[in-house]
Image (spheres, rainbow, N blue to C red):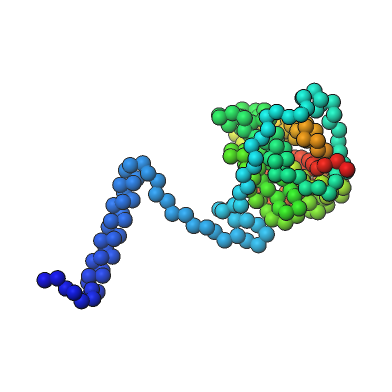
Amino acid sequence: MLSTGCPNQSSVIVLMLSVAVLAACVSTSARRAGVSVTVTATAPSRAGITSASSPQVTALPAPQLKGPLSLEEALAQRRSVREFADTPLTLAELGQLLWAAQGMTHPAGLRTAPSAGALYPLEVYVVTREATYRYEPQGHRMSVHMEGDARPRLYAAALRQEPVLNAPAVLVIAAVYARTADKYGADRSPRYVHLEAGHAAQNVLLQAVALNLGAVPIGAFEDDTVKQGLALPSDQQPLYLIPVGHPR
């Protein structure tokens, strides 16, 4: 006999158990078929620093592979520029500079700068008035590493060199030595890492010229103060500061 009244407690329990069994069967079938079933949650951000589990990501414009200058012209015009106009860089300019430093140029993951064993120990950050961003070569994008203007802290760490404070953007090249040391050993790997940082920095300097920008490479700074000021991971060491902007 079919009941027309409200379901009793036993009926509710049976219904809930049936739903749970059905969900388990769907999940099992999906795994057997090779389908990924995931549950995602958004973690809250701390004040001033975006959570690493849900970073704010900015897609960068595709890099331009042809410019107004030849390589020879860029080499001839390159000079260290230490005074900058109070004009922010565009997203396209930032993207082109970051791509020049460590952009991917091959489906196998090869990049604009050579790397011993293609191990790529370098990490590139860009510090602006709004935030510090970490460049992600795969996907050509940048994610918020730390919110707020870290240039005053870099300025203090860099022995109060004015370009670090006044440039609209400061590229920071850091290195994870262990990536190279795992293959080449602790004695030889630092040389390879330092050579690679030089390759990447020269790419940035020449790209700045091609964009009608100015830049200056800076190596005089207190390593630990830079690391602390940018909240770099413990395995990363800063190697280069490169202020970039429109020449004044």
Quarter placement of the C terminus: top right
In front here: 234 or 205? Answer: 205
Location of residue 7 by image quarter: bottom left
- Image location (x, y in percent) of residue 19: 29, 60
- Image location (x, y in percent) of residue 30: 34, 46
157 versus 194 height, above or below? below
For the point 70% across and 34% down, the residue is 100
Location of residue 179 by image quarter: top right
For the point 85% across and 44% down, the residue is 84
In front here: 13 or 195? Answer: 13
Residue lying at the far front in this picture: please name it: 68
Q: How many labels does the image show?
A: 0
72 versus 224 height, above or below? above
In front here: 48 or 182? Answer: 48
For this view, does 136 lie left or right of residue 85? left
> In this view of the protein, can residue 209 be seen by the observer?
yes
For this view, does 242 lie left or right of residue 51? right
- Image location (x, y in percent) of residue 9: 24, 74
> In this view of the protein, can residue 202 be seen by the observer?
no
211 versus 6 height, above or below? above
For the point 28% across and 56% down, the residue is 22
